Image (cartoon, coloured by chain):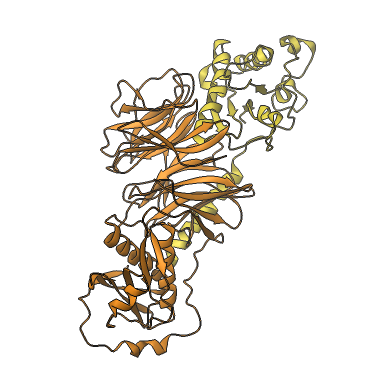
Chain colours: A yellow, B orange
Amino acid sequence: MSSRIAKTLTVAAFAASLAACSSVPLDESANNGSGSMGSGSASTGQVMDPFNPQSPLAQQRSVYFEFDSYTVPEQYRSLVEMHASYLSGHAQQKIRIEGNADARGGAEYNLALGQRRSDAVARMMTLLGVNSNQIEAISFGKERPRATGNTEADYAENRRADIVYQR
Amino acid sequence: MAIVTSIKPAPGSSWGAVASSLLLAAAGVFAAGSAQAQLRVDISGVGATQYPIAIADFSGDAQGQAIAEVIRADLTRSGQFQMINATGANLDANSNIAYDDWRNKGADYLAYGSITQNGGQYSVSYRLVDSVGRSQMDGVAFNGSEKELRRISHQIADRIYEKITGVRGVFSTRIAYVLQTGNTYELQIADADGQNPQVMLRSKQSIISPAWSPDGKRLAYVSFELGKPVVYVQTLATGQRVPLANFKGNNSAPAWAPNGQQLALVLSRDGISQIYTIGANGSGLRRVMRSPLIDTEPQYTADGSSLVFTSDRGGNPQIYKVPVGGGDAQRLTFNGSYNISPALSPDGNKLVYVTRRDGAFRIALQDMGSGGEQLLTSGPDDESPSFAPNGMQILYSSVQGGRSVLSVISVDGRVRNTLSALNGKVREPTWGPFTN
């Protein structure tokens, strides 16, 4: 019995260290996905480097969805186009698109809803010419809420897909 | 392991007072499990029929009182028994029973026994008698270590339950759930009464959807430790864990086939969430069907021939059924616009699921034959229902007074228990199978 406990605790420690090693960039700016930036920004002298915090590629990478909707809103088209343009020119660069859902309802169904959001962004990107091998669309469902409250504003904040560049 | 042997009805002689002097004032308390969070049991409501029974403290060792308390708590929690006071009974396994006295106290049934210790090994003998029929209904002896006494107590309660109700007891089965404390997630296994929790996995990332293998020896679950949902299978006895499905996109919602050789799960490798089957060794991945929208939460029917699952192909999430080899899906739920998380009763006659009604997430039960639906709970946030292996109760998570807890409700909706954690958020519960 004692050896079984020791092993299970080893498993727990192993999992914790795995989690600590995985790098999932946090989104430092929650509400900058307004979509106001034009697709022509690259030509206006801005730095187009997803790993430079000053770059619009780093700052504008969240797509927000309407309630019960899984299509990319028109106002985010230019944002998706900006990323698609960069990815088309950097064929080795890979991204993850992380879908989210609000906290109401079941864990698995919300995981699937978040996936519909990340998949919608991914399909738009591939239609814009990005190789699907550069994109992995996943979902956190309701497991990683950025807003933890129970207001409509909190729910809206979590109906979101984030574009995350992989190093 | 606890060893079971049958014992014959007590002879006519009476020498029951021998062991009683060994009963000490200190109450025997079984050793707690390795996890810190203990669950607390609350009960509300009573069953339609209650069998009056007295459970005497077992004689011979201080642990005998704890054994009787576990048996009483188990039977009380079922809602099907009325406890008759047995204080001062001073019975051991070989006592002569004054049937008329117990009958006059209102106890139609009486359980009693003895416990002795020799070199750290305990021997527990128990008998169950019918005081109306003046006959023995059961008599068994168990051997085990101190840490096995709680399990032995649950096994005695299972025998009493089955002898009297005719239905197999579930007190010695186990449950799995996820306990979230701050940013730490623990996959835990506990006895069916919530006691004796063991941590199977601790992670800084979310864990969801634990699923028991049919033999109760393995758990499949979804862990986010790699920054995305990946399905793992962990062997409980060794702690060994292997990724079963780590395909591009999401890997989630594992469910074991009744034969334990295959699992159904949900992958998004081809776009949105779709249902696949895979061998328990990771071989033979196969897509069950092609759906235009979400298919998720597959569960095998008891014969393994079909899957019930959640899909929003009809415009909102409803529960469907499809042959495991693919084909036309049949819609099962029609009330309300949000029905998810299906689970089938062991006999296949009942379907339990989460339904949203007027903004509240409630547990609903549907008769598979008539289609009639009964709302078992009132919400507001009840999730993750699963049947006890005898089909008599349903385990689910709920929010009460702002706290997330585990709850158990009888299939007739009359008796509800709360297994309440002292701290943290308890979610994703699932009831394990019979294991002996």
Residue A132 coordinates in the image, percent (x, y): 51, 18
Q: Is residue A24 left or right of residue B175?
A: right
The quarter of the picture where the N terminus of chain A appears is bottom left
Number of marks in the image? 0
**Depth order, front residue of A45/A138:** A138
**Depth order, front residue of A58/B327:** B327
Residue B369, above or below B56 = above
Residue B109 coordinates in the image, percent (x, y): 31, 69
Residue B332, above or below B262 = above
Q: Is residue A34 left or right of residue B281?
A: right
Residue B404, above or below B11 = above
Residue farthest right in this picture? A45
Q: Is residue A156 left or right of residue B418?
A: right
**Depth order, front residue of B135/B275:** B135
Residue B323 coordinates in the image, percent (x, y): 29, 27
Residue B324 coordinates in the image, percent (x, y): 30, 29
Residue displayed at 34% across by 38% down: B350
Q: Is residue B221 visible?
A: no
Quarter residue B308 falls in: top left
The quarter of the picture where the C terminus of chain A appears is top right
